[in-house]
Amino acid sequence: MRWYYNIAQSIIDALHQIFNEEKQADKVVNHLLKSQKKWGARDRRFVAQVLYDVVRWKRFYEVIVDAKIENQEDKWKILAVWSYLHQFDLPDWTEFQSVDVTTIGDSVANIKEEAVLNSIPDWLQNKGITQLGETLWKNEIAALNKEAEVVVRVNTLKTTRYKLQQKLSQKKVLKRIEV
């Protein structure tokens, strides 16, 4: 997928609402997606993914380009970092002119602090190591940084597990079945 200006500007506006106006990310995303009737399912998924990724990895992205997401021009830098890390080519827009994409990879390689790499506050890193120990904390934070799987529960008053499995398999929705 390539960047479209209206989508990028909508993401920047949503980031402003989340970080400058302190609105809840899920409510901002829901409102944005409802207000953009012309966007297809692919655009909606993309916008939601970018916004939630930026919210989750804010500290990491800010350190990479020495930016603060609360600053309007820095939001574009953060979007450039997201683009680079997800292998999107940056368009030749004036908003991206201040970003040297070639240095982003070097910046990532130079980050040594675990708290920054995991995009968590220092106090949480220290507390996690103190309470769980370094090895267990690393495993815990690695698990927390993975995207959660979708879980489907069967309402046995309306169908059986077998019938639902069949229906989902026919629609190629089901990847694996756990009992």
Image (cartoon, grey):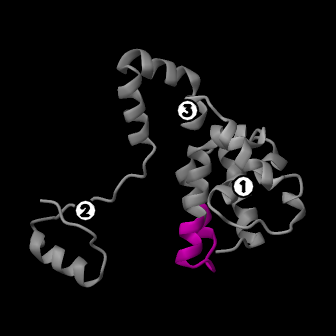
Residue that carries the numbered disc 1 in the rendered image = 79
- Please give the residue where the numbered disc 3 appears in the rendered image: 120
What secondary structure is the stretch in magenta mostly built from?
helix
Residue 34 within the magenta-colored segment of the rendering? yes
Q: Position of residue 47 (x, y in %)?
A: 60, 64
Instruction: Give residue 44's quadrant in the image.
Output: bottom right
Relative to residue 91, is residue 171 drawn left or right? left
* Residue 36 falls in image quadrant: bottom right
Disc nearer the start of the sequence (3/2)? 3
Q: Secondary structure at mark 2?
A: loop
Q: Amino acid at mark 3?
A: Ile
Where residue 112 appears, x then y in whole percent?
62, 31
The amino acid type of the residue labelled 2 equals: Val
Report whether 75 appears left or right of 49: right
Residues under numbered marks 1 and 3 in contact, where contact means CB atoms less than 8 Å apart: no
- The earlier-in-sequence mark between 1 and 3 is 1
- Where is residue 144 drawn, in percent x and y? 41, 40
Residue 16 in sight from this viewpoint:
no
Identify the residue at horizontal 81%, vertical 42% (top origin): 71
Which of the image's four quarters has the C terminus? bottom left
Mark 2 crowdedness (10 Å alpha carbons): few <14, some 14-19, many ≥20: few
Residue 128 placement (x, y as % from top left): 43, 22
Q: CA distance from mark 3 to mark 2?
A: 30 Å
Query: In this view, which residue lies farthest toward the top?
Result: 130
Q: Is residue 137 above or below residue 169?
A: above
The magenta segment is 31-46
Residue at the image point whose x is 64% and y is 40% from the top: 60
